[in-house]
C-alpha cells in the first residue's frame, strides 16, 4: 500500500522532471535559431533577410513544442508513479519532440513539397500516437492521483485523437494540393468542436440518469 508521503514524493519527482523537460524543450527550439552575421548594419539586415525561413522555423517549432509540453505537463502533474510501459512511451515521445526542430527546418525548405510536408506530418503523428499510449498506460495501470479531474484525461484524449487524425489525413491530401496545410490549421477548431460534442453527450447522459 502506498503511503501519502510516498505519493507526494512521487508527485514532486514527476513535477521536477516536467520542469527539467521545459528547459530541454526550450533549448531544442533555440538551437535552430540562426544568428545574423555582418560587420555593418546593412550586412546584418541582409543576413536577417537570408535567414527568414530559419526564423519561421523557430516560431513554428516554439508553438508546436509549447503545445506538446503543455499537454504533457497537464497530465503528468497528476501522475504518481511510472509504472507499466510509461517510461518507454515517454522516451519515444521525447524522440519525436527532439525531431521537431529538424522536421520544421525541413518543412520550410524549397522544393520537394510532398517529402517535406509528409516528414513533418509523420513526426507530429507519431508524437500523438506515443502520447496516446502514455494516456492509455496511466489510466490502465492507475498511475494517476485519485482526485484527478476526469476532464484532464478526457480533453487530452480528444486533443490527441483530433491532432493525430488531422496530421495523418493531411498526408494523402498533400498529394492532391499544397493547401493540405488547412488540415493542420483546422486542428484547434476541430478540438473545440469535439470537446463541445462530448460535453453535450455527457450532459444528456446525466439528464437521462436523473
Image (cartoon, rainbow, N blue to C red):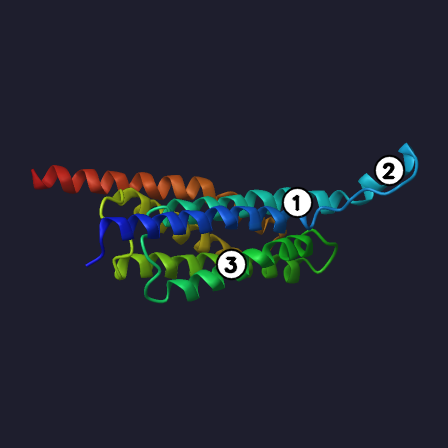
Query: x, y (%) of residue 131?
Result: 42, 57
The residue indicated by pointer 1 is 58
Disc 2 target residue: 44
Quadrant (top left/top right/bottom left/bottom right) for the N terminus = bottom left
**Left-right relation of 150 to 56:** left
Observer able to see residue 170: yes
Give the side of residue 77 with respect to residue 203, left or right.
right
Mark 2 Cα-neighbour bin, 10 Å: few <14, some 14–19, many ≥20? some
Q: CA distance from mark 2 to mark 1?
A: 19 Å
Q: Nearer the viewer, mark 1 or mark 3?
A: 3
124 shown above or below 54: below
**Which residue occupies the foreground of this view, 46 or 40?**
40
Per the model, the C-alpha gap separating discs 2 and 3 is 35 Å
Lower sequence index among marks 1 and 3: 1
Element under disc 3: helix
Tell me the tag on residue 94.
3
Q: Is residue 71 left or right of residue 11?
A: right
| Residue found 23% across the figure and 49% down from its top | 4
Q: Is residue 44 above or below residue 174?
A: above
Q: Nearer the viewer, residue 118 or 2?
A: 2
Amino acid at each position: 500500500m502506498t503511503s501519502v508521503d510516498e505519493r507526494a514524493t512521487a508527485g514532486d519527482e514527476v513535477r521536477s522532471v516536467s520542469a527539467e523537460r521545459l528547459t530541454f524543450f526550450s533549448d531544442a527550439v533555440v538551437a535552430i535559431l540562426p544568428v545574423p552575421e555582418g560587420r555593418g548594419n546593412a550586412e546584418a539586415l541582409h543576413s536577417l533577410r537570408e535567414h527568414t525561413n530559419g526564423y519561421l522555423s523557430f516560431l513554428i517549432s516554439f508553438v508546436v513544442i509549447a503545445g506538446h509540453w503543455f499537454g504533457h505537463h497537464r497530465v503528468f502533474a497528476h501522475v504518481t508513479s511510472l509504472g507499466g510501459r510509461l517510461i518507454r512511451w515517454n522516451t519515444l515521445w521525447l524522440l519525436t519532440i527532439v525531431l521537431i526542430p529538424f522536421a520544421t527546418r525541413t518543412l520550410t525548405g524549397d522544393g520537394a513539397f510532398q517529402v517535406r510536408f509528409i516528414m513533418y506530418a509523420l513526426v507530429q503523428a507519431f508524437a500523438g500516437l506515443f502520447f496516446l499510449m502514455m494516456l492509455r498506460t496511466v489510466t490502465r495501470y492507475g498511475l494517476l492521483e485519485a482526485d484527478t479531474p476526469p476532464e484532464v484525461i478526457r480533453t487530452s484524449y480528444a486533443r490527441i485523437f483530433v491532432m493525430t487524425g488531422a496530421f495523418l489525413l493531411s498526408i494523402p491530401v498533400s498529394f492532391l494540393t499544397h493547401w493540405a496545410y488547412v488540415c493542420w490549421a483546422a486542428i484547434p477548431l476541430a478540438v473545440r468542436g469535439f470537446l463541445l460534442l462530448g460535453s453535450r453527450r455527457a450532459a444528456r447522459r446525466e439528464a437521462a440518469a436523473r
